[in-house]
Amino acid sequence: MSDKTILVVGTYDTKNDELEYMVERVRAMGGGTLSMDISVLGDPENPTDLSKHDVAEAGGSSIQAAIDSGDENTAMQIMAKGARLLARKLHAEGKFDGVVVLGGTMGTDVALDICQGLPLGVPKYVVSTVSFSPLIEPQRLSADIQMILWAGGLYGLNSVCKSSLSQAAGAVLGAARAVEPPTQDRPMVGMTSLGSSCLKYMKKLKPELEKRGFEVAIFHATGMGGMAYESVARDGGFACVMDFALPELGNLLAGSVINGGDDRMMNAGRAGIPQIVAPGCLDLIDFAGWQEIPEQYRDRPFHAHNRLIKCSALNAEERRETAREIAKRLKASETPAHVILTNGGIEEWDREGQEAHDPAAFGEFCVEMRQQMTDPIQFTELDCHINDQAFVDAVLQIFDRWIADGTIKTGGR
């Protein structure tokens, strides 16, 4: 009897040998397998557990429709939709414990959709000819996806590509055996922050929230962290969110690759999760360390955080734009949203004497925030810095009031 079952996905008409090799490796290690074919034109050498017809029909289409489209991109998007929905359904039914998908650019395109459709904690491995490539848009990566380069395996098995395939087979089975998925025994607060050299509130808030019986998950707001936060919020995984680090929103508006996706600040409200929000670190634009700073940002205050991230400051009008965008997104929320503005500063480097200190531009931001934070948004302005104890106290007052009036549910998720 196998202990864990792995869903093995790929185009079995063109990559049958490679996929069967991974199936054999999983089984040799005592795991079970479930095979899914996402081919369109051809057929596998042997029937798969889930046929290409099953996949297309799961998405409300058919293989014939994919063929009749006359376009391989359209055809594979039909398969991607079906594969995502079918995989999600099968996992909810307990049919598999982890997934591994094999592909070139076409297969990887489908793989990313499959992985985004599965909950956090489900092991997700993609063996791809374009792993880690700039072709892959960051916002298409699920929170806990793992990738390995399919080296030397474009066509046919050999000892080089077997190294990649066997590692993936072992990794996904091992992960399925080892993983401790998120539990639901305590309600969870989702919080965004940056490192404590910049934003410090999490150090004081986390123990206080835990005393109140809540689990606290803190997400690093550097692009991928924001996407993970939004993913959990989308699935209703939080009792309340404390979205206090918003550089990903400013980065999105500025066109930086270090953003949390187009739906940043949207999913908690859509999922009925109450939100306490503060514009922490929303005065800086983050750039990848290897990037050249665009010309229009080179005369700004600058902070080189490390070799991975460097920052330029937003000017006054750009900060006003971020305030308007916060209001737009929060006013779409279906549950209460309370914004706290600390008019003494929003991150450690904006204090007097630090690189990002720009009182004129910050003052413009505060003016716009006061104008934009209108009903149904609840708004509090504090005469303090975001890293001061007064901010923590105000957050806890709102949190406790929401517990008392039932806005925040205190039972398990």
Image: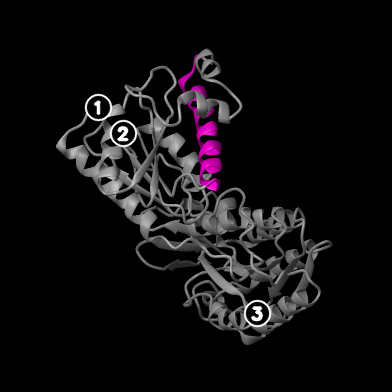
Q: Give the numbered dot on residue 19.
A: 2
Can you tell which of label 3 and label 1 is closer to the viewer? 1
Can you tell which of label 1 and label 2 is closer to the viewer? 2
Q: Which residues are magenta?
A: 70-93
Q: Is residue 188 above or below residue 333?
A: below
Q: Residues within 10 Å of mark 1 (few under 14, many from 20)?
A: few
Q: Residue beneath label 1, please? A: 155
Q: Residue 24 placed where, x, y %?
A: 26, 39
How far apart are the alpha carbons under marks 3 and 1? 61 Å
Frontmost residue, 78 versus 267? 78
- Going by the numbered disc 3, the residue's amino acid type is Gly
Frontmost residue, 379 versus 298? 379
- Going by the numbered disc 2, the residue's amino acid type is Leu
User: Which type of secondary structure does the marked residue at label 3 adopt?
Assistant: loop
Q: Look at 47% across and 51% down and name the residue there.
A: 295
Principal secondary structure, stretch drawn in magenta: helix
Q: Residue 34 placed where, x, y %?
A: 40, 38
Q: Residue beneath label 3, please? A: 344
Is residue 75 inside the magenta stretch? yes
Instruction: Report how many numbered discs are placed on residues in the image.
Output: 3
Which of disc 2 and disc 3 is earlier in sequence? 2
